[in-house]
């Protein structure tokens, strides 16, 4: 539109030889106002595109948070089953086929958790972290460092950055 006005000004100059200063100033003012309007609309469009991009990112993050929340709710109900299977594996039995079967079921449960983004929290030998671990007792052990985890009573689990269940641990020194 602004380009059309410029072309009209040039054509008017060609046909009339000379254009009155008033007409020329009027056309220039219209041209400048239309350029300003275009710049304003371009700026609004850029802002709208940025807002839409932020909306998409925010929506994706909310969806991921909701998914992780739902998965963690289901996992919380399954964790006691996994704990009991781990206890069953640690019990001595004469029937080796039974033990292998329980180990396979436990492995399958852990694989399902891992496939859904749920991981075990590493504890034994690591430094105590109150965001991941819950200390149930402390002991003195000259062989271990300060705040080093000596023993784990119950495994903890995490999905993304969210702790589903804290590890119950014994902390040294």
Image (tube, rainbow, N blue to C red):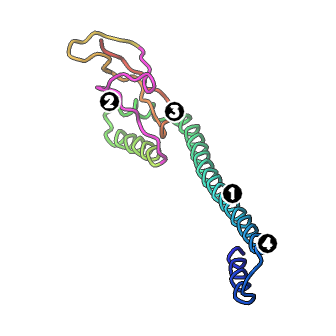
How crowded pointer 1 is (Cα within 10 Å; few <14, some 14-19, many 20+) is rated as few
Look at the image and tell me in which quarter the C terminus lies.
top left
As measured in the structure, the alpha-carbon distance from the residue carrying label 4 to the one carrying label 1 is: 33 Å
Magenta-drawn segment: 116-136
Q: Position of residue 79 (x, y in %)?
A: 50, 34
Specify few, some or many for label 4: CA neighbours under 10 Å numbering under 14, 14-19, or 20 or more. few
Residue 126 among magenta residues: yes
Residue carrying label 1: 44
**Mark 3–mark 4 CB contact (< 8 Å):** no
Q: Quadrant of residue 90?
A: top left
* Distance between the alpha carbons at the discs numbered 1 and 3: 44 Å
Task: In this rendered view, identify the residue nearer to me: 3 or 85.
Answer: 3
Q: Secondary structure at mark 1?
A: helix
* Residue extending farthest bottom: 15
Residue 167: quadrant of the picture: top left
Tag 1 or tag 2, which sits nearer the N-term? Answer: 1
- Mark identifier at residue 92: 2
Q: Work out how far the residue at label 2 is from the one at label 1, CA to CA, in angstroms.
A: 72 Å
38 magenta-colored: no
Find disc 4 in the rendering and name its residue.
Answer: 22
> Would you name the residue on which mark 3 appears?
164
Q: Position of residue 63 (x, y in %)?
A: 61, 48
- Residue contact between numbered discs 1 and 3, judged by CB atoms under 8 Å: no
Name above or below for residue 153 compared with residue 142. Answer: below
Cβ atoms at labels 3 and 2 below 8 Å apart? no
Closer to the eye: label 1 or 3:
1
SS assignment at label 2: loop
């Amino acid at each position: 539109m602004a380009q059309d006005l410029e072309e009209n000004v040039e054509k008017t100059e060609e046909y009339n030889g000379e254009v009155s200063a008033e007409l020329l100033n009027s056309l220039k003012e219209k041209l400048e106002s239309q350029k300003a309007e275009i710049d304003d609309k371009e700026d609004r469009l850029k802002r709208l595109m940025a807002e839409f991009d932020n909306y998409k990112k925010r929506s994706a993050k909310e969806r991921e948070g909701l998914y992780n929340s739902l998965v963690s709710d289901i996992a919380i109900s399954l964790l006691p089953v996994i704990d009991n299977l781990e206890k069953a594996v640690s019990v001595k039995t004469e029937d080796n086929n039974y033990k292998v079967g329980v180990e396979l079921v436990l492995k399958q449960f852990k694989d399902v958790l891992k496939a859904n983004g749920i991981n075990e929290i590493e504890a034994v030998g690591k430094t105590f972290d109150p965001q991941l671990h819950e200390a149930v007792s402390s002991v003195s052990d000259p062989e271990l460092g300060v705040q080093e985890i000596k023993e784990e009573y119950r495994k903890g689990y995490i999905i993304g950055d969210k702790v589903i269940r804290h590890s119950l641990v014994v902390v040294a020194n």
